[in-house]
Image (spheres, helix red, strand yellow):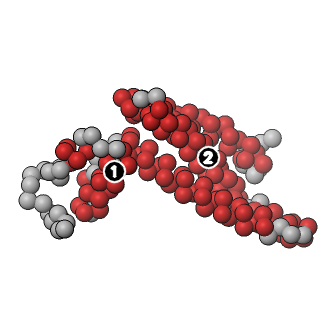
Amino acid sequence: MSTPPLNPPYAGSQHPLDDSVTANCPSLICEIYHLEILLIKGDPMRYKWKSGQWAFVLHRVSGVALSFYLIMHIYVVSSLYDPQNFDTVMAFLNQPLFKILEIGLLAAVVFHGLNGIRVMMIDFANATRVHAQIFWVVLAVSAVLIAVGAVPFLMHAGVLGH
């Protein structure tokens, strides 16, 4: 099976199979196909990034970040076997960098959760026609919840007054 040439002989940036392949395919297959086209062409700026693609990528990135956090959390908690070690670890985790990472964790949890609800709405409530609007609502609600949720972290870090 041969791969398409990097500089296809056809006009424009559309692959000749784009419409026929993505017309009635499941979303994961479409995403894999579009990612393959992106990698073959080698120019991510030629790929039309729409709300569905952003939702797909951000959901996967937040999921991987949460998985990494879970592994690190289990490791840190398992290392807390005596009071002295606990104090050492807590002093290390009380650095400003970790306060920023806590806000990043909050952002990943909020977005991943809300976008997961959006995915369920699309899958089970037949909301495919309004998926883009729902994505923007998810982003707006996420931004508000992250901003409100970040306040206690920033107050504890001394960035905001008590």
How far is the residue under mark 2 from the one under mark 1? 26 Å
The mark nearer the N terminus, 2 or 1, is: 1
Report the residue that reaches farthest toward the right: 83
Q: Residue at x 29, y 62 (%)?
A: 39
Q: Amino acid at mark 1?
A: Ile
Q: How many marks?
A: 2
Tell me if residue 6 comes above or below residue 59 in the rendering. below
Decide which of 20, 130 is in the foreground and name it.
20
Snapshot quadrant of residue 96: bottom right
Which residue is under mark 1? Answer: 29
Q: Residue at x 78, y 48 (%)?
A: 156
Q: Residues within 10 Å of mark 1 (few under 14, many from 20)?
A: few
Percent across and percent down for residue 38 are 28, 57
Which residue is tagged 2? 109
Residue 97 appears anywhere in the view: no
Quadrant holding the C terminus: top right
Label 2 CA crowd tier, 10 Å (few <14, some 14–19, many 20+): some
Q: Is residue 72 left or right of residue 38?
A: right
Determine whether, in the image, residue 88 is placed left or right of residue 26.
right
Q: Nearer the viewer, residue 97 or 72?
A: 72
- 42 to 117, vertically: above or below: below
